[in-house]
Image (cartoon, rainbow, N blue to C red):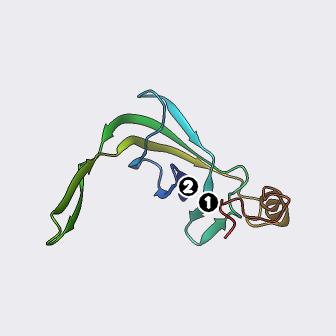
Amino acid sequence: MYAVFRTGGKQYRAVPGEVIRVEKIDAEVGARVEIGEVLMLGSGEDVQIGAPFIEGGKVLATVRGHGRADKVMIIKFRRRKHYRKQQGHRQYYTEIEITDIGGESGSKAGSKSSAKSAASKTPADGTSGQGNGE
């Protein structure tokens, strides 16, 4: 069985027993973390797709450690203009071990009830809520 879940603005595919690095989560080492934003569950030919999330779907994980990734260098350079700028960045991450994947196997993903709940989250004025009105 596998799951696709979202945390930290990114999507990850997970299998029980797997160790993955996700965006930093504020949790102590050894703590159990429950991730509720499950987008897809699959086992063999049986696949459930959420709209946008699977109701009752969750991924349980244990925090194994925190760290920082390798440095990424950002370089801006304009030839013949006497312009050069350098900057470095190291992203924080949390290493988690997937312990269990759960969800409602009897419910149909993408049902009308989950579509209604997703539609009710949009603002009343019909905008997407993304900002500048373009």
Element on which disc 2 rests:
strand
Question: Against 19, is 52 above or below?
Answer: below
Q: Can residue 107 be seen in this view?
A: yes
73 horizontally vs 132: left or right: left
Give the amino acid type for the residue marked by disc 2 in the picture. Answer: Phe
Q: Distance between the residues labelled 2 and 1?
A: 5 Å
Question: Against 36, is 75 above or below?
Answer: below
The residue lying toward the viewer, choosing from 107 and 35, is: 35
35 horizontally vs 15: left or right: right
Residue 5: assigned label: 2
The quarter of the rendered structure image containing the C terminus is: bottom right
Residues at badges 2 and 1 in contact (C-beta under 8 Å)? Answer: yes
Quickly name the residue at label 1.
Answer: 39
Residue 15 spot, x, y in % from top left: 47, 54
Give the amino acid type for the residue marked by disc 1 in the picture. Answer: Leu
- Quarter of the view holding residue 126: bottom right
Residue 73 spot, x, y in % from top left: 23, 55
Residue at image position (48%, 30%) is 27
Q: Residues within 10 Å of mark 1 (few under 14, many from 20)?
A: many
